[in-house]
Amino acid sequence: MKMLKRKGNLISFHPAQILVMGFGSLILVGTLLFMLPIATYEEGRGLSFIDALFEATSAVCVTGLAVVDTGSTFTTFGEIVLLCLIQIGGWGFMTTGIFMFIILGKKIGLKERLLLQDSLNVFSISGVVNLVKRIILITVIVELIGATALAIRWSFDMPFSKAIYYGIFHSVSAFNNAGFGLEPDNLSKWVGDPTVNIMVTFLFIIGGIGFTVILDLFHKRSIRKLSLHSKVALTMTLILNIIGPFIIFVSEYSNPDTIGSLHFGDKVWASYFQGVVTRTAGFNTIDIGAMNLSSLVFMMALMFIGASSGSTGGGIKVTTFAIIISAFWAVVTNRDDVNIFKRRISWELVNRSLSIVVAGIFFIFLIFFLLTFTEDADMSKLLFETISAFGTVGLSADFTPELSPVGRIFITIMMFIGRLGPLTMAFALLHTRKDAKVRYAEEKILIG
């Protein structure tokens, strides 16, 4: 298999392979830093290699799954390392690299622009450097708003300096859809708090709809003038953010271990938060492990769908899901074209969307199958953990710390695949390009 090609004395990699190596390098650096004694409170030692690798991968892949308690395990140094990995991971290593080039005044060539295009998943290289500048600006503004609001709210519960630190940490974690929290029970203390619920969901929803959609909204300022991508992303996000809380509310209403014992207003807030957080970030205000099986199954579906393309979230993406549903509707209604918002979608894009779904299902099944050999747990917990890692969501049914060392490696691999995307990973592993010299005769196969 030809994974790379030589041009003169240079070796040229496929963009997918460069993305894999870039994220892998970030994870390696994070792993080494977490292994330092200064990174944890445990005197004289840092995390073990497997635990450090897991935590670094979870941070760089903005997942939020953790095998140790963040607040009680990491020192301030360790938490700052974690926060930096989350921010770089949310931007992507190419965006961060180009940003450093801009700061240092270095020239950004065609190769870097092509890699950036692939990393940001945009249609062309035109304006990608300006897009990076806008991404950085959006990030700073939104995270500053979130940090300020959360710090003011938490200043009533803790010393002001600690409230500022909590505000910054949770704002960065939320906007980048990471889901890391500094409390042992994440955000459960504030299950019915309007400020915390609104600000945290605002941050991860904005981060989850994607930078291209945010910029499109800013420039067009009219729903009718938005690009088709923005319309589909916003519509699907709205629909899923309405359905999610409703299903959680109905399914968990009488469960005394989750929202059953809460006042009606707190039930609404808890259902809203857990219903919209499931597709993107790993925060929780109720005990996920105590939720009904029906809720967990529904949450798996939302985690698999994920956020929008070009965002800090994972999953197959809402736009991919919309194309698959539209293609299904076109087939069952015997239509020749796939149409969305009175626009025709090419079958090439439909096939690519199907490939993403198939690749995602394949990787999920593979890791889930391997976990059945290494873990002694219910199938529902294993599958939930696997899909959460694939969607880079970070929710856990109280199972992540119980993973065996081998199981932690499998989930680490799943988080890595989920952040890069199943199709990107497939390209990186299997990429080979051959111009077809023969076109074979067509023949039919019975299906369905």
Image: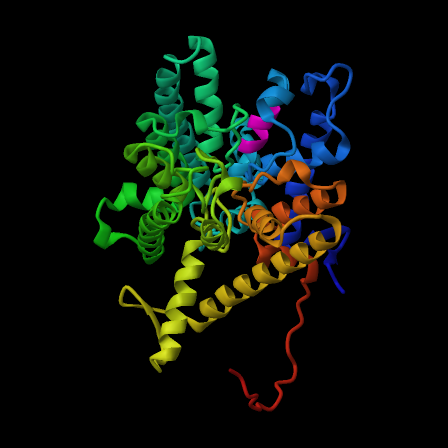
Is 170 magenta? The answer is no
User: In the rendered view, how is the structure colored?
Assistant: rainbow
Residue 75 drawn at (x, y percent): 63, 17
Residue 107 drawn at (x, y percent): 55, 37
Quadrant occupied by the N terminus: bottom right
Residue occupying the point 56% across, 53% down: 421
Residue occupying the point 65% across, 55% down: 368
Residue occupying the point 44% across, 15% down: 164
Residue 156 drawn at (x, y percent): 36, 12
Residue 262 drawn at (x, y percent): 35, 33
Q: Is residue 88 left or right of residue 31?
A: left
Residue occupying the point 32% across, 46% down: 216
Give the prevailing secondary structure in the magenta stretch. Answer: helix
Q: Which residues are magenta?
A: 80-86
Residue 307 in the image: above or below residue 49:
below
Is 84 magenta? The answer is yes
Residue 267 in the image: above or below residue 209:
above
